[in-house]
Amino acid sequence: MKHFLSTSVISTVTLALLLQSSAEDWPQFRGPHGDGHSAASNVPLTWSETENIAWKTPVPGKGWSSPVLVGDRIYLTSAVAAGDDQDALKVDRSLRALAIDAGSGAIVWDVEVFQQPAASAPQIHRKNSHASATALVEDGRVYVHFGHMGTACLDRDGKILWKNQELKYTPVHGNGGCPIIVGDHLIFSGDGGSDPFIVALKKDTGAIAWKQPRVTDASRTFSFSTPSYFEIDGVPQVITPGSNGVSALNPQTGEELWRCNYDGYSVIPKPLFGHGLLYIGTGYDNATLMAIKPGKTGEVSTTNVAWVIEKRAPHTPSFLLIGDELYFVADNGMATCVDARTGSIYWQERSGGRAFSASPMFADGRIYLQDEHGLSLVLAPGKEFKVLAKNQLDGATLASPTPADGALYIRSATHLYKVGQ
């Protein structure tokens, strides 16, 4: 694996130690460092429904949370609707957490965390689910998040240790953002239809440690981004994009350290940091990729934007930084590689996929892209566009894939696959 030296190395190592993960674990959205990188080896290159599939396990209900892998278990969330139609609008749902044996695909436990009555079920986007936030595992505890319905912590045996349903807000299109752990806090955003906020829960009890209103002048306040944690120039900070701006917060108090404004709402991509720059997506209506020099205090929109890409930037998938190159795929399938320092485009090509929501992943020296229709593309990193493999599975695939030594876990609308032997 190619590595780069920057302040981000310090921050990702800190986070890796914090999560106490082995090299092959994938304990949260976008992996142990939150950047889509894996240290796994012998990750499969080719597969199909009939080739190189170790097992295929039906998953009850519907959910687009990505698989997380810790030790010998995979953890998922799902929303199980009453009746046979899992896409029905106004029905009762059971919001659940599942543990699956990574070796055999057997469901170890399947626990109801919350009930979502039909009367209070939000209208979600056609591509969303009622269980889209990826679980997070640390020290034998499994943290699951269902947006406005609540957040909970379970132990390895599926016993619920705590729940928090205090944070009421009106979601727009449902929930999508995931929590992160920073020290003793579980931090996530509540960017709903009004009064958006960022909150930290005490990870041991679920009690609110701090809650800060998001600073924004947006008329459309809903967004879905997962925050990122970095220590930049010795300053710990949570980077949290939302509608019309990204803020850096003190992880202990929630106090805003600095902010960069832009035009955009329904922001989804998770921030990355490298080469002294933060890489941020601005959401709808016109997706833009911004490279921002971290600020010190105050509003830095006119002083700290290093470069901007305004065409073919992603609305949904997050970015991938490998060495000096930044990779991303737009929702329509246009893949791009740019110079991470300058934004200069090396290549911009049709990937071959039709539509993308999953974030790209780097493992075993290769880039893995997952489109929404079961097609996985494997690319060679570098300044020239090169497709190494195209692999097709059945069904919709909006969750991001999870690598492991000798395996790849892919979630479809109905099943979890283990690719490999």
Image (cartoon, rainbow, N blue to C red):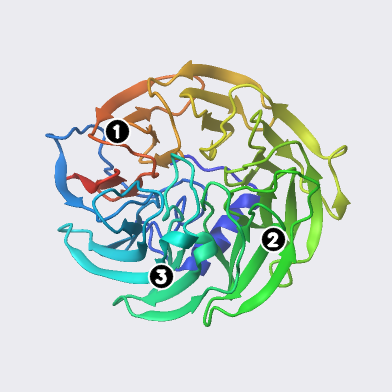
Q: CA distance from mark 1 to mark 3?
A: 30 Å
230 sits to left or right of 79: right
Spot occupied by residue 23 in the image (x, y as percentages of width and height): 38, 57
Can residue 148 be seen from the camera position used here?
yes
Q: Which of marks 2 and 1 precedes in the sequence?
A: 2
From the viewer's perspective, is residue 404 above or below residue 203? above
Q: Amino acid at mark 1?
A: Gly
Disc 3 crowd, CA 10 A, few/some/many (<14, 14-19, 20+): some
Can residue 139 be seen from the camera position used here?
no
Q: Secondary structure at mark 3?
A: strand
Q: Amino acid at mark 2?
A: Phe
Q: Which of marks 3 and 1 precedes in the sequence?
A: 3
400 sits to left or right of 331: left
Spot occupied by residue 141 in the image (x, y as percentages of width and height): 41, 74
Spot occupied by residue 356 in the image (x, y as percentages of width and height): 44, 32
Reading the image, the residue beneath label 1 is 374
Q: Secondary structure at mark 2?
A: strand
Q: CA distance from mark 1 to mark 2?
A: 35 Å
Reading the image, the residue beneath label 2 is 197
Who's the residue at 45% across and 46% down the image? 37
Q: Nearer the viewer, residue 313 or 198?
A: 198
Q: Which of marks 3 and 2 precedes in the sequence?
A: 3
Disc 2 crowd, CA 10 A, few/some/many (<14, 14-19, 20+): some
Q: Which quadrant is the N terminus positioned in?
A: top left
Who's the residue at 63% across and 70% down the image? 200
Q: CA distance from mark 2 to mark 3?
A: 22 Å
Reading the image, the residue beneath label 3 is 114
Disc 1 crowd, CA 10 A, few/some/many (<14, 14-19, 20+): many
Who's the residue at 65% across and 40% down the image? 279
Q: Secondary structure at mark 1?
A: loop
Q: Nearer the viewer, residue 288 or 272?
A: 288
